[in-house]
Each structure stands twice: as C-alpha cells, then as structure tokens.
Image (spheres, helix red, strand yellow):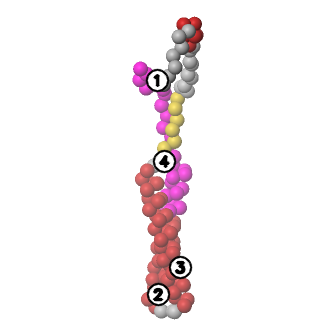
Amino acid sequence: MAKTDKNPTERIKTEDTKVEVNFPSKIQIELVQGNELRHYEIFFLLTTLALSTAVSFWTTYVITPHRAIIFSAWAFSGLVLLSGLLTFYYRSKLYNGKITKSTSLSTFKIE
C-alpha cells in the first residue's frame, strides 16, 4: 500500500518537478522481406534433410554397390546442390536487400 506524506511542503516540491523527454526528429527502421525469409528457411531445411539422405545413400552404396542405390545417391546429391544454391541465393537477398523505412515524428498524433 502506498504511503502518503502529510507534509504540504514536500507535496509542493514534487509538483514543481518537470521531466523533459527528447525525441529524435526521424525514426528509421530496417525491415526484412518476410517472403525471402520464408523461402530461405524452407530451402535450408530441404538442404539439411536431403544432405543427410544423400550421405546415407552414398554410405550404403560403398558398402553394397547396386545400380538403384547409386541412382538414388546421385538424385539426392543433385537435390542438395540445387537447394543449397537456392538457400545461398535467398540468404544473399536477405542480407543485401534490407528495406529502410523512415518517417518523421510529426506525423504521429500526440495527445
């Protein structure tokens, strides 16, 4: 529970206190494109899953060589290469394609 002071001189001192807040004249915010971020995450996940699958097929082929296993190993290796390239493409778009929005504070309504 809050304690109230009964001394009137202290109450006058707190009423005379002023607080100044200084705001910048302009606000800048860096935004990331959500679509590129989503594509980057999808292709990164696809790359990691396909990489482990391709390594499994290559390991199996080394142990027991078979034509179907080598076909699957090459197919998943190609998928890793393609999705890896797309991952780096969308990653570069994220880091290099930032959008900076700026506005002045005078456009906001102050009540």
Dividing the image into 4 quarters, which one contains the C terminus?
top left
Q: Residues within 10 Å of mark 2 (few under 14, many from 20)?
A: some
Q: Check disc 4 and give the amino acid type.
A: Val
Which quadrant of the view contains residue 109? top left
- x%, y% of residue 11? 54, 10
Q: At 45% from the left edge and 83% from the top edge, which residue is drawn?
A: 72
Tell me the residue that label 4 is attached to: 32
Note whether 39 is above or below 23 in the view shown.
below
Instruction: Give the secondary structure at mark 3.
Output: helix
Q: Which mark is residue 55?
A: 3
* Residue at screen point 51% across, 54% down: 93
Is residue 12 placed above or below 43 in the rendered structure?
above
Q: Which residues are magenta?
A: 86-111
Relative to 26, say whether 101 is above or below.
below
Q: Amino acid at mark 2?
A: Ile
Q: Residue at x 56, y 13 (%)?
A: 14
The mark found on residue 106 in the picture is 1
